Amino acid sequence: MTDLPVAIASPPIGFAAAPEPPDLLAPVKLRRGLAGFAWRHPAIAIGGALVLAMVFVAVFAPYLATLDPTAIAPARRTREPSAAFWFGTDMLGRDVYSRVLYGTRVSLTVGFAVAILASLAGLAIGLVAGTIRWADGIIMRVMDGLMSIPPILLAVALMALTRGSVGNVVVAITIAEIPRVSRLVRSVVLSLREQPYVDAAVVAGTRTPMIILRHILPNTLAPMSVQATYVFASAMIIEAILSFIGAGTPPNVPSWGNIMAEGRALWQVKPYIVFFPAFFLSLTVLAVNLLGDGLRDALDPRLAKRL
Amino acid sequence: MLTYVIRRVLATIPVMAVVALFVFSLLYIAPGDPAAVIAGDQATPADVERIRQSLGLDRPFLIRFGEWCWQILHGDLGTSIFTNLPVANLIAQRIEPTLSLMAVTLVFAVCIAVPMGVVAAWKVGTWIDRAIMAFAVLGFSVPVFVVGYLLAYIFALQLDWLPVQGYSPLSNGLWPWLKHLILPAVALGSVYIALIARITRAAMLEVLQQDYMRTARAKGMGQTDLLFVHALKNAAVPIVTVIGIGIALLIGGAVVTETVFAIPGVGRLTVDAILRRDYPVIQGIVLLFSFVYVLVNLVIDLLYTVLDPRIRY
């Protein structure tokens, strides 16, 4: 009561001042453009910004790195982090900072390649299973079988057969990820088939390939892109695990898993060799997962509810 | 009910057949000729051919697959190339630490994750809910070995509360056994906890909206009973399902966790087998764990009727 403007006379005792009428026509704050988008979808903004930063690091690794990541220098083995060697040096004297930067390339390449390949293969398999009835049973039994092999073991078993190379790692992880993607596509296709507009298209005499192309395929893209980001994150983790246990990229490639595997023997005395790549890996996976959660909420609220 | 059980058990046969066919194909296309390995360096091509015929390696794919399946059904998982010991024996020697690790992780994770999910659903929209969900995203993102090294660094190296690595068999006493498993179990459990907590929250949110929850509240049921007895029981089916599905995470993660904490289990055996290109060992482990995984999920499917009496088959 005391801080009412002087112009308004204080009400007589026993009467309360009428409450301010609510401002019914308060200006709606419309946030447009990039800033508005970021405000509405903070997960996409933060995750996307972090992923872009990582892509930047990967692309410009040669300019950001201070030393050749593969240069061996026994004279400066296992140095602690310092001004000259920001993340220290490993047991062969290689600069951990430069190796971690180059490791971004391996991780993002594997994640991106697996996301694209597994999505394409999963899309094709899921579409076939969802539209051709007799193929559905066979395909889904095979997928059930592959899904009952834990993904890491599946990738390990495949990698044991071949030489370690980035390409082979991509193929092995893709095979491990395909079943989940194709199951998702199939379930989406099956629910889309029941939609009235698909019935309408059938009644109108549209041919099946055209229905798939015009009505089914575009509607699978939203859940697919969400799934693809999760596959991206999962592929980066599996790649690091494979390299860490010696079944991934060859030891001369500076991938995060390899750097950690090399730091394993020394980690109790020189923990930084393990922790710097571990931090980058966790941050990148977190960024991609945030992006995925944001996309899920933005693109498909029903999926968000189902989780 | 009985027909359902029989049908469900029969349905696992094609799944296991696909797994077996896949694993056998890997063995079939694996580089290196077992006959040449057995014959040794001095052997002539004729010797190798003779050994190949005596091993039956020259016969068609399907016949060999059939015989291999027959062996598997008799518990014969093949022979290690490197140690020349039966793979089944090698796995049996190493199974205790792995089973201990997985059992401790399972119990620990369920005890933490389910209350977390329940509380998040109860306090939905508040900072508690957001904190728990943020933790879940973090749990999904930080890989097993990163959590493992971080925990070992803090609690073993810096604070010196728990052993850095190693394993103590259960026969050496309960506490030494548990002491060695706490850090690995927390590391291995992080992803699993995140998964279970998320599903528990979603399932609980669904149940809390039901009319019977309002009725129970109107009858004067206490908040704890309401959440943990009334609601959780009705949310049990999806939660138990995801606990079963998540065992794949435990199996895969065990390989890494055992490497980080130097636990001499099946995971360690896998890593050693990879380094030595010991294919029969790798395939035996993949086959065994996949079968265990299928069986666990079969049991959970059969449990549905116990958990939710409304489900009738």
Image: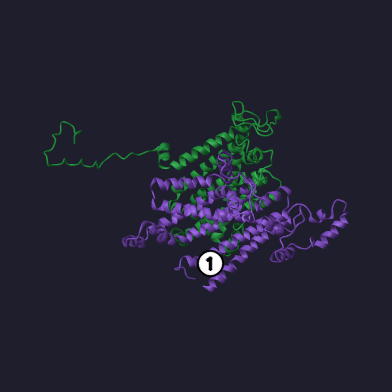
Chain colours: A green, B purple
Q: In the image, residue A158 lies at what x, y percent?
A: 67, 51
Q: Which residue is mark 1?
A: B302
Query: Residue at the bottom extreme?
Result: B2
Q: Residue at x 43, y 42 (%)?
A: A41
Within the image, what quadrant is residue A19 found in? Answer: top left
Query: Residue at the front extreme?
Result: B173
Q: In the image, residue A15 lies at what x, y percent?
A: 13, 42
Query: Residue at the top extreme?
Result: A83
Chain under numbered label 1: B
Task: Name the one closer to the observer, B178 or A36.
Answer: B178
Q: Amino acid at mark 1?
A: Leu
Q: In the image, residue A216 lies at what x, y percent?
A: 50, 55
Position above or below: A64 against B179? above
Query: Residue at the left extreme?
Result: A12
SS assignment at label 1 = helix
Residue A181 in view (yes/no): no
Task: Name the one closer to the observer, A148 or A79.
Answer: A79
